[in-house]
Image (spheres, rainbow, N blue to C red):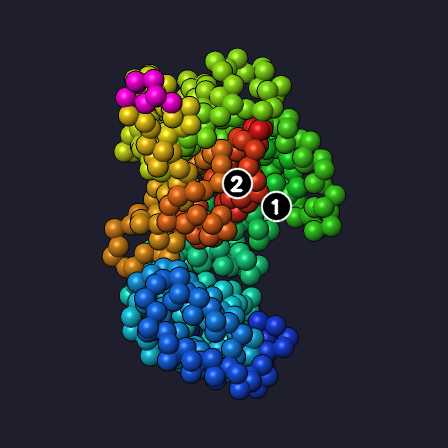
């Protein structure tokens, strides 16, 4: 673990004049309680009086959110204990309020509480609020959190310091690039790159051979974002030893560096660099804009090689998980049949179309690809506990599993009792548990979005790096049902995992959620039609 010297701490404190001059969250922020009103103190007083009487999580959440807009240190006093509440919805509401201050006094109170707080869940909540609020001049208490015994606290301290966009924090967070925990190394790389710091290129070069693939992914991305000529040969060499998805990441970063659209043609990248390495200059931002159109056309020419393909989405990944909706509505027939005429499907039922496409993809997987399948409705079912190689035996087993997939609790089975064919279907089994399926696919233990406590057995360094998620409807069951809540929780949980999430929609529901889920998680959205 990286341990800070007093010199490093003093460096930040000496920069306090720079940081303190920055706004907290907006030009309105100041050291005076500009937004304070007597009503702020009144609502805090009422909260203290009634909050403990509320037992229902929804009522407790609503009570916490009643403090939004109150610009007083009293809000910090009453909400910091709530950051340790057993209900995640209540905790998140408290963090949301603590991230909403527009004046300095409550922010300073937040920092003061960080100095005194010893409980890890509460320290994490405080740091999450600081990060979400993009507060600056966080000072000694947050810098000291960089030395915390818990890696989750160290990681969140890095993110909180960087979120304000102040370049003065760069020399303070950069040493944690050598932290023993992969998640912390990723946070430093991502933060330095977001700040546009030269150190991102230096650290990226140092960590591009890291044993953890998520760290290598962050290093590759950092080299592409902070554009330096020295990064070109590093990325070319990394491309040559990587496999699967990270090869595409390396090619993308090379394109961002140079504007060249050689895609996955490594021989062209090598030829380019051998020819121009002694005199090449990184294009300006203006020049890069002019190259975008040509790049788009050339990317079609230099397509992904040795890629797997599911419903038109190509991936070079060698660790793929297919998550397939088998809720009751999957027995419905498609409406836009012209779109499916060329598929030679056994019927117009959504389930038959999906099963056919998945079977074709499985048949085409190369032996070096590892894959898995999860089917879901109200509950989830795994084909295998772990990803397995796509050899002939495993593919035969997977095809049998896919062949047996049927919509659960569908309406077509309602008339079975009337015909003397036994008990009716369990309609409750055919709901759509979107969150549960995605949480299982990403390995989010108990659906928690917050980073696990130190020593937790949760494995965020998951084996899978690419997920295909196919569904035909809105979520109707599970821990979270609101699409915005699912989007936020899954995206937050995936920050640690860095899994690419492709989404495929079929049916006539609102598909904006599926599109956002893919965009926010580095994937591609496909609309198969109604």
Q: Magenta stretch: give its range.
A: 415-422
Residue 423: image quadrant is top left
Rendered image quadrant of residue 467 = top left
Which badge, 2 or 1, is on the more N-terminal residue?
A: 1
Q: Label 2, on which residue?
A: 514
Q: Quote the CA–CA distance across marks 2 and 1.
A: 31 Å
Residue 45: give x, y in percent of width and height: 42, 83
User: Circle 1 — which element?
Assistant: helix
Relative to 104, residue 193 above or below: above
Q: Where residue 265 appears, x then y in whole percent?
A: 57, 29
Residue underneath mark 1: 257
* Residue 159 appears left or right of 252: left
Indicate which label's residue lies in the foreground, 2 or 1. Answer: 2
| Label 1: how many Cα within 10 Å (few below 14, some 14–19, many 20+) | many
From the top left corner, tell me how far across and down residue 192 is, in percent. Answer: 51, 59
| Extreme-front residue of the structure | 418
Res. 2 in view: no
Q: Position of residue 466 (x, y in %)?
A: 44, 36
Q: What kind of element bears circle 2? A: helix
| Residue 390 vertical position relative to residue 436 in the rendered view, above or below | above
Residue at 60% across, 48% down: 229
Q: Nearer the viewer, residue 11 or 67?
A: 67
Q: Which mark is residue 432?
A: none
In-front residue for pair 195/282: 195
The answer to whether residue 224 of the structure is visible from this angle is yes
Q: Residue at x 69, y 31 (%)?
A: 297
Q: Is residue 225 left or right of residue 329?
A: right
Q: Which residue sits at x=56%, y=85%?
A: 37
Q: Main secondary structure of the magenta part?
A: loop
């Amino acid at each position: 673990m990286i341990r800070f010297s007093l010199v490093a701490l003093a460096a930040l404190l000496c920069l306090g004049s720079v940081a303190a001059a920055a706004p907290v969250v907006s030009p309105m922020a100041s050291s005076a309680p500009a937004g304070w009103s007597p009503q702020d103190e009144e609502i805090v007083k009422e909260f203290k009086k009634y909050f403990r009487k509320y037992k229902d999580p929804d009522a407790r959440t609503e009570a916490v959110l009643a403090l939004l807009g109150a610009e007083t240190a009293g809000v910090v006093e009453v909400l910091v204990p709530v950051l340790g509440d057993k209900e995640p919805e209540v905790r998140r509401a408290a963090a949301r309020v603590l991230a909403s201050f527009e004046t300095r006094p409550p922010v300073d109170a937040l920092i003061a509480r960080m100095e005194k707080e010893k409980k890890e869940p509460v320290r994490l909540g405080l740091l999450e609020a600081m990060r979400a609020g993009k507060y600056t001049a966080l000072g000694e208490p947050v810098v000291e959190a960089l030395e915390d015994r818990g890696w989750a606290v160290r990681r969140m301290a890095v993110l909180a310091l960087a979120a304000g966009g102040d370049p003065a924090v760069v020399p303070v967070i950069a040493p944690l690039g050598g932290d023993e925990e992969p998640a912390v190394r990723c946070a430093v790389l991502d933060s330095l790159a977001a700040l546009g710091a030269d150190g991102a290129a230096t650290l990226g070069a140092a960590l591009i051979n890291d044993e953890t693939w998520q760290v290598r992914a962050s290093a590759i991305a950092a080299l592409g974002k902070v554009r330096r000529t020295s990064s070109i040969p590093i990325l070319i060499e990394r491309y040559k030893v990587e496999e699967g998805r990270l090869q595409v990441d390396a090619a993308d970063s090379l394109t961002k560096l140079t504007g060249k659209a050689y895609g996955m043609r490594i021989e062209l990248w090598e030829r380019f660099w051998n020819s121009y390495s002694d005199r090449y200059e990184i294009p300006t931002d203006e020049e890069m804009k002019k190259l975008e159109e040509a790049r788009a056309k050339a990317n079609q020419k230099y397509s992904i090689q040795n890629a797997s393909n599911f419903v038109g989405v190509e991936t070079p990944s060698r660790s793929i998980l297919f998550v397939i909706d088998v809720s009751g509505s999957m027995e419905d027939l498609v409406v836009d049949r012209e779109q499916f005429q060329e598929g030679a499907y056994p019927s117009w039922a959504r389930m038959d179309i999906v099963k056919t496409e998945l079977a074709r993809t499985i048949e085409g997987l190369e032996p070096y690809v590892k894959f898995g399948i999860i089917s879901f409705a109200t509950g989830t079912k795994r084909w295998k506990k772990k990803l397995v190689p796509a050899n002939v035996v495993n593919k035969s087993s997977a095809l049998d599993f896919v062949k047996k997939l049927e919509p659960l609790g569908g309406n077509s089975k309602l008339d079975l009792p009337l015909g003397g064919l036994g008990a009716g279907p369990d309609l409750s089994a055919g709901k759509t548990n979107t969150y549960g399926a995605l949480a299982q696919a990403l390995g989010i233990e108990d659906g928690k979005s917050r980073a696990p406590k130190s020593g937790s057995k949760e494995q965020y360094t998951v084996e899978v790096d690419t997920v295909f998620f196919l569904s035909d409807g809105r979520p109707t069951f599970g821990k979270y049902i609101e699409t915005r809540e699912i989007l936020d929780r899954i995206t937050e949980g995936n920050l640690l995992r860095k899994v690419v999430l492709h989404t495929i929609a079929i049916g006539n529901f609102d598909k904006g959620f599926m599109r956002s889920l893919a965009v926010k998680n580095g994937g591609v959205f496909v609309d198969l039609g109604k």
